[in-house]
Amino acid sequence: MSINFPLILVLATAASGLIWLIEVVLLRPRREAAAGPEGAGKEPVIVEYAISFFPVLLIVLVLRSFLAEPFQIPSGSMIPTLEVGDFIVVNKFAYGIRLPVVGTKVIDVAEPANGDVMVFIPPHKDEYFIKRVIGIPGDRVRYEDKRLYINGVEQEQRFVARIPPDRPRYLWMEETVGANTHMIRHRVSDPAAPREWMVPAGSYLVMGDNRDESSDSRYWGFAQDENIVGKAFAIWMHKEPGLNLPSFSRNGWIR
């Protein structure tokens, strides 16, 4: 299980704020009364740290919980849209304002749409995943011969390239899902049997753009509304694994 950073941040913010409050309401007046005209004396070290860190922690908590949060792409499941080592920014309020840690939605803003690139926690693993929304509640989705059909309508695909050109292992295609046009990749071989899903209420069918090398809804089920983190909208940095300097050549909006 990955470290629950949101919970740690909430607890650290609450603890430092509580220490600051106790200092102002109880401890400082007592020190002032005991010291008399000489003053309250020096604050305990833990109080100094709490007063110093609380405003910073509070700002980080608000920004991270309700506005935007950075993530790093750990796998190749979204190639060619996202590469391993991409640092992305996620809009935390695109699909509604949620309470940190518990994830309860308190303000509705919008719902995920087909074609969105979404960050969420899947039902089988307690860590962040990023995939593309392929089906929203009420959609009937069929995946056949590496093509998508949503409510009986084939989603447009256009051939772009064979990689590598001489002995191709992959085909790069431009695909349109909903109002979003993006790149996908699939292996030349590996035919798969047709599959079909009916997306239930409060659930989303998601797939990686690297269609034949992605762990997604085809294997572990639907992404649930209460586990949505936000909408990925931009790449702000890229760093190859190992001792490599970061690069900004891939900066741009995510389609």
Image (cartoon, rainbow, N blue to C red):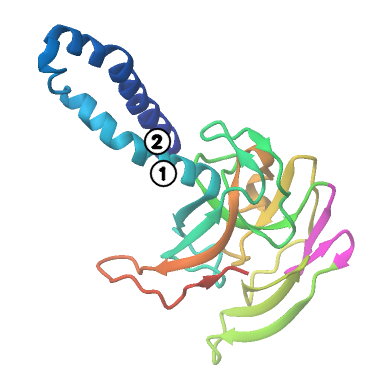
Query: How far, Cα to Cα, is label 1 from label 2?
Result: 8 Å
Q: Quadrant of residue 195?
A: bottom right
In the rendered image, residue 20 lying in the magenta stretch gets the answer no
Residue 9 image label: 2
Asked if 146 appears above or below 94 in the picture, the reply is below
Going 63% across and 69% down the picture, which residue do you hit?
Answer: 255
Going 68% across and 45% down the picture, which residue do you hit?
Answer: 221
Q: Nearer the viewer, mark 1 or mark 2?
A: 1
73 to the left or right of 180:
left
Going 45% across and 55% down the picture, which residue do you hit?
Answer: 70
Q: Quadrant of residue 202?
A: top right
Mark 1 falls on what kind of element? Answer: helix
Amino acid type, mark 1: Val
Residue 210 in picture, x, y percent from top left? 59, 67
Question: CB of mark 1 within 8 Å of CB of mark 2?
Answer: yes
Relative depth, front residue between 157 and 90 = 90
Residue 60 image label: 1
Residue 150 in picture, x, y percent from top left? 83, 61
Relative depth, front residue between 250 and 135 = 250
